[in-house]
Image (spheres, rainbow, N blue to C red):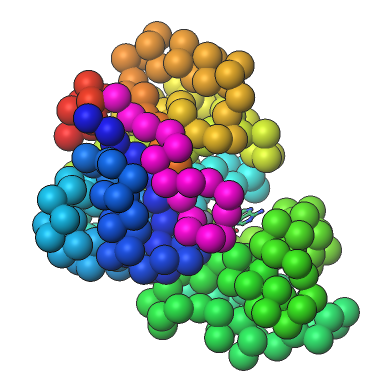
Amino acid sequence: MRADLHTHSTESDGTEPPAIVIAQAAAAGLDVVALTDHDTTGGWDEAGIAADRLGIDLIRGIEISTRRQGASIHLLGYGVSTEDGPLADELAQTRISRETRARHMVDLIAQDYPLSWEQVLAQVPTPETTIGRPHIADAMVAAGLMADRDEAFASVLHNRSPYHVTHYAPDVAHAVRVVKAAGGRSVLAHSLARKMRRPLDEELLDELVDAGLDGLEVAHRDHDAHAQEQLRRWAVQRDLIMTGGSDYHGDGKKNRIAENLTSPEMVARLR
Ligand code: AMP
Ligand code: ZN
Ligand code: FE
Ligand code: FE
């Protein structure tokens, strides 16, 4: 059984609609795929219809933007309820703040580059899409100001760029509790990636396990062999679920669907 538990669609910053992501997952020979858009469950219905039609197993997921001491941390949530409640409230607040933040960033960028908010909006696929820096990147590429998303992220969109603005995000321990309260399972995404301003340490991990964290994403292209070994050791010591995923974003990133997988045993535990 082949399972990829981390993908994005046009509901956030992926470039393919949910149904296409699922079709690509099936074409790549996956048996199980999770759609995990940033801060939204908006792609689940379309993905579910496509998955039923193609006979592939869909796990309904989400990648929640969280923070700890100013540093961004991504938390994957699986099988959460979409009912009104603390999780839905947090996601709504984050999405509203993401739009305000994107407008603010574009105001700052527009002082030095010919870029308008309308040009950015033209790159946002639907009114419900979770807006992120990749959409600003796409507008700059469309305007001929950047070659691709990578170039935009390496310069004006970088965390430490003078044009960077942060958005609201819940504290990571609070997010773990809220996922639990919504009946889901939580897995820390790419927590030892080189780009992380705050790589995971055992003190934070133990705090999150106490809050109800279920697992660690181990197999991910931003984790080198050493990082994967460290995460595996931490997970085994605490009996946590270990996952793998591609973090596929369509043409928006180099990550290819199914490039990292989760074992059948771990998929069963997640469920
Ligand atoms: P934001 O969530 O708006 O702060 O933007 C960060 C998101 O942009 C990450 O979650 C990635 O999915 C995406 N991203 C980061 N770096 C790159 C890059 N170099 N190329 C394309 N997408 C990126
Ligand atoms: Zn993304
Ligand atoms: Fe992420
Ligand atoms: Fe992701």
Quadrant in the picture for the N terminus: top left
Residue 175: give x, y in percent of width and height: 39, 46
Residue 24: give x, y in percent of width and height: 34, 54
Total marks placed: 0
Residue at 48% across, 66% down: 15
Magenta stretch contains residue 259: yes
Q: Quadrant of residue 127?
A: bottom left
The magenta segment:
247-263
Residue 17: give x, y in percent of width and height: 36, 68
Residue at 59% across, 71% down: 135
Specify whether residue 124 is in view. Answer: yes
Quadrant of the displayed image that contains ligand 1 = bottom right
The residue lying toward the viewer, choosing from 80 and 70, is: 80
The residue lying toward the viewer, choosing from 49 and 99, is: 49
Magenta span: predominant SS is loop
Magenta stretch contains residue 227: no
Residue at 29% across, 24% down: 263
The residue lying toward the viewer, choosing from 98 and 126, is: 126
Residue 8: give x, y in percent of width and height: 42, 56
Residue at 63% across, 45% down: 71
